[in-house]
Image: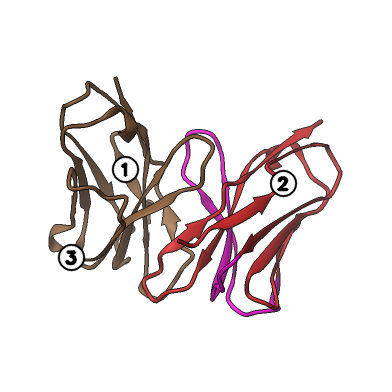
Chain colours: A red, B brown
Amino acid sequence: GQQLNQSPQSMFIQEGEDVSMNCTSSSIFNTWLWYKQEPGEGPVLLIALYKAGELTSNGRLTAQFGITRKDSFLNISASIPSDVGIYFCAGGSSNTGKLIFGQGTTLQVKP
Amino acid sequence: DTGVSQDPRHKITKRGQNVTFRCDPISEHNRLYWYRQTLGQGPEFLTYFQNEAQLEKSRLLSDRFSAERPKGSFSTLEIQRTEQGDSAMYLCASSLAGRYGYTFGSGTRLTVV
């Protein structure tokens, strides 16, 4: 079945640093999304990408939909302590809205 | 709009017991999804409804699992004869048809002892 490889698995950074994480797939997706999950809660949508090559920002977050439609990346600029959490990429390729999720990148920010 | 609501938040059950979870989606959303998430993993698709029709089920959804969405509003997910491997977070999400960026609930954490 379809799988997404998300890297890195975890990051421990200093407040103020920029962060970059990415997601790759062996399959093509029509949509890429990035979610953030905090302990004990469901994932919260950060950014949705609908076109190959699309670059979209949401505050300090920037994400891109790869040209090949098999990858995406997420950048966080000037990290702050509340950025702590697990970041998931997700790809969608069917009309059902079903998403395939990556394994997540755990981000820790040291004040 | 009060978001997606799931009940209960936590459930501890003995192996072999049946459990039922409820999800109340955002009222105007016609699609409702169930996902399962184990520790250290991303959510995995279980099933989805458009209105009251269950349109797709994952192979992860064994015969012990059943989901319903009567009248196209709230949904229930039942697990019969629970096993320790069923221990996970069960997430519900809703959206409008054609939209991928759906809203998740806070989940029901199931522990089977």
**Local SS, label 1:** strand
> Does A49 appear in magenta?
yes
Left or right for A25, reference B62: right
The residue that disc 2 covers is: A8
Quadrant (top left/top right/bottom left/bottom right) for the C terminus of chain A: top right
Subunit ID for the residue under disc 1: B
Q: Nearer the viewer, mark 2 or mark 1?
A: 2
Asked if residue B21 is positioned above or below residue A110 in the image, the reply reads below
Q: Nearer the viewer, mark 2 or mark 3?
A: 2
The residue that disc 1 covers is: B6
Residue at position x 57%, y 63% in the image: A33
Span shown in magenta: A26-55
User: Are tags 2 and 3 found on a single chain?
Assistant: no
Whether residue A54 appears in this view of the structure is yes
Residue A99, image x, y percentages = 46, 62
Residue at position x 48%, y 34% in the image: A40
Whether residue B10 appears in this view of the structure is no
